Image (tube, helix red, strand yellow):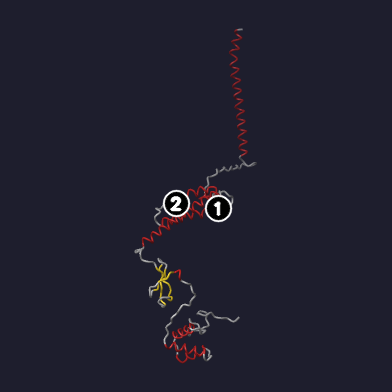
């Protein structure tokens, strides 16, 4: 019994070692077969079926962050505008150029807001937020414009050398009711009165009445021109002659110069007896359409 037991004790570990070696070898073979089969499947899947061409797998690109400035992403516009509102050009607030630059910057933001809303067809920009931003920008512009008006008023006051000098505006000549003369008058802006330069009398602007009138025009002519014009008018009115025929007859007799012809035509026109002649083309061919009168063509 003891011999058999010793034999069994000695033989049992050897059997286990052999079995373990066989098992390990079998498992290695199975793993190698499985790995080779998997690698073949992977190789077959990475190739075009029936060919050795390897299929190129496109890498999935990660979505990049977008913004309004570069990508015109409307969902990022509100944050973009709020950020720009914090970057109004710095200025002292006491100079016109500084305030005007800030106004231009804010108006540019308003234009950008309007363009963004018009192009936001998908409605990514919240309408209420856009309206609040527009009102905020408009309020800032109004404050700057009020400051500009104050600065301009202060500048005018400072540049006025003598603040006591009254402001006045010249008024066209009119008849003075006190001195009965036709003389220029001026408007005393500070006291709101019209002052005659001849007698220095004044009346309130509220007492003035607007009346339609014909302006007076004084033209000085010499004796020769007065004689010719008088002859032409008298021949037409009293004798029924054609004024143009009489004009040409007097021209042949007295040999009018170009300046005299122009003067006579203007004086006759002022008297209400115009002669159909082109004043821009004295003694020139009237066929060309480059003077005072347009050329007429038969219908």
The N terminus sits in image quarter: top right
Count of labels in the image: 2
Figure check: 50 above or below 201 = above
Q: Tell which of 279 and 22 is nearer to you.
A: 279
- List x then y, in percent, for residue 208: 46, 71
Left or right: residue 282 versus residue 162 is right
- Residue furthest to the left in view is 161
Figure check: 216 above or below 71 = below
- Where disc 2 sits, the SS reads loop
Which residue is the site of mark 2?
88
Q: Tell which of 94 and 29 is nearer to you.
A: 94
Which residue is the site of mark 1?
117
The C terminus sits in image quarter: bottom right
- List x then y, in percent, for residue 3: 60, 8
- Where disc 1 sits, the SS reads helix
Figure check: 176 above or below 138 = below
Mark sitting on residue 270: none
Task: Estimate the spatial distance between the alpha carbons at disc 2 and disc 1, rounded to whole Å.
Answer: 22 Å
Mark 2 or mark 1: whose residue is earlier in sequence: 2
- List x then y, in percent, for residue 152: 41, 59
Q: Residues within 10 Å of mark 2 (few under 14, many from 20)?
A: few
- List x then y, in percent, for residue 169: 41, 69
Q: Tell which of 243 and 210 is nearer to you.
A: 210
Q: Residues within 10 Å of mark 1 (few under 14, many from 20)?
A: some
Among the 4 quarters of the image, the one containing residue 35: top right
- Residue furthest to the right in view is 50
Disc 2 to disc 1: CB gap under 8 Å: no
Residue at point 42%, 72% (across, down): 171
Figure check: 120 above or below 269 = above
Left or right: residue 13 versus residue 229 is right
Q: Tell which of 224 and 101 is nearer to you.
A: 224
């Amino acid at each position: 019994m003891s011999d058999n037991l010793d034999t069994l004790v000695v033989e049992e570990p050897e059997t286990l070692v052999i079995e373990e070696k066989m098992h390990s070898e079998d498992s290695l073979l199975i793993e190698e077969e499985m790995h080779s089969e998997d690698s073949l499947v992977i190789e077959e899947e990475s190739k075009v079926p029936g060919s050795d061409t390897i299929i190129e797998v496109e890498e999935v690109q990660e979505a990049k962050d977008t913004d309004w400035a570069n990508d015109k992403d409307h969902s990022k516009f509100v944050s973009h505008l709020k950020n720009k509102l914090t970057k109004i050009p710095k200025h002292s607030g006491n100079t016109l150029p500084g305030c005007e630059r800030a106004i231009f910057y804010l108006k540019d933001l308003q234009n950008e807001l309007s363009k963004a809303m018009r192009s936001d067809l998908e409605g990514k920009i919240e309408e209420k937020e856009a309206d609040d931003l527009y009102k905020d920008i408009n309020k800032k512009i109004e404050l700057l414009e009020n400051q500009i008006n104050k600065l301009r008023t202060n500048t005018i006051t400072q540049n006025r050398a003598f603040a006591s000098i009254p402001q006045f505006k010249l008024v066209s000549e009119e008849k003075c009711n006190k001195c009965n003369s036709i003389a220029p008058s001026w408007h005393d802006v500070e006291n709101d009165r019209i002052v005659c330069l001849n007698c220095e009398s004044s009346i309130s602007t509220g007492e003035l009445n607007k009346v339609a009138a014909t302006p007076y025009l004084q033209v000085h002519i010499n004796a020769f021109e007065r004689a010719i014009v008088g002859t032409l008018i008298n021949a037409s009115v009293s004798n029924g002659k054609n004024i143009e025929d009489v004009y040409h007859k007097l021209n042949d007799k007295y040999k009018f110069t170009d300046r005299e012809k122009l003067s006579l035509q203007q004086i006759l026109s002022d008297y209400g007896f115009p002669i159909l002649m082109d004043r821009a083309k004295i003694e020139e061919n009237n066929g060309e359409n480059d003077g005072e009168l347009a050329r007429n063509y038969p219908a």
